[in-house]
């Protein structure tokens, strides 16, 4: 799916203001939580980066319960 920068900007503004309902391009969307908003923003940013040909960045986090 292709995403637009207006979708990305609307998600960023909603996260910054703490609003769970947002409108862009004549569409209304309501999210259940801030985590859902952040996941949607990550998806949109990844899609925009893929469309523009930028390399995908990944993070690997390692956790341990006991001393190594």
Image (cartoon, rainbow, N blue to C red):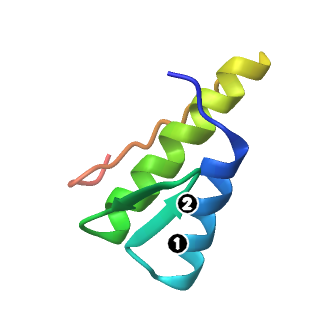
Q: Secondary structure at mark 2?
A: helix
Q: Residue at x 67, y 31 (%)?
A: 48
Q: Is 59 positioned to the left or the right of 63 in the image?
A: right
**x%, y% of residue 6?**
68, 50
Q: Badge 1 local density, few (<14 within 10 Å), some, or many (20+)?
A: some
| Viewer-proximal residue among 13 and 63 | 13
For residue 55, say whether it is visible: no
Residue closest to the far bottom:
17
Q: Which residue is mark 2?
A: 11
Which quadrant holds residue 29?
A: bottom left
Q: Residue at x 34, y 63 (%)?
A: 35
| Viewer-proximal residue among 51 and 62 | 51
Q: Badge 2 local density, few (<14 within 10 Å), some, or many (20+)?
A: many
Q: Residue at x 28, y 54 (%)?
A: 67
Q: Are marks 1 and 2 in contact (CB under 8 Å)?
A: yes
Q: Which residue is mark 1?
A: 15
Q: Is residue 18 above or below residue 28?
A: below
| Viewer-proximal residue among 22 and 58 | 22
Q: Secondary structure at mark 1?
A: helix
| Viewer-proximal residue among 25 and 42 | 25
């Amino acid at each position: 799916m292709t995403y637009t920068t207006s979708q990305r900007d609307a998600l960023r503004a909603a996260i910054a203001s703490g609003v769970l309902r947002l409108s862009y391009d004549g569409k209304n969307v309501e999210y259940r939580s801030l985590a859902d908003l952040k996941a949607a923003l990550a998806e949109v940013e990844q899609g925009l980066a893929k469309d523009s040909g930028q390399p995908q960045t990944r993070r690997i986090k390692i956790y341990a319960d006991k001393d190594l």
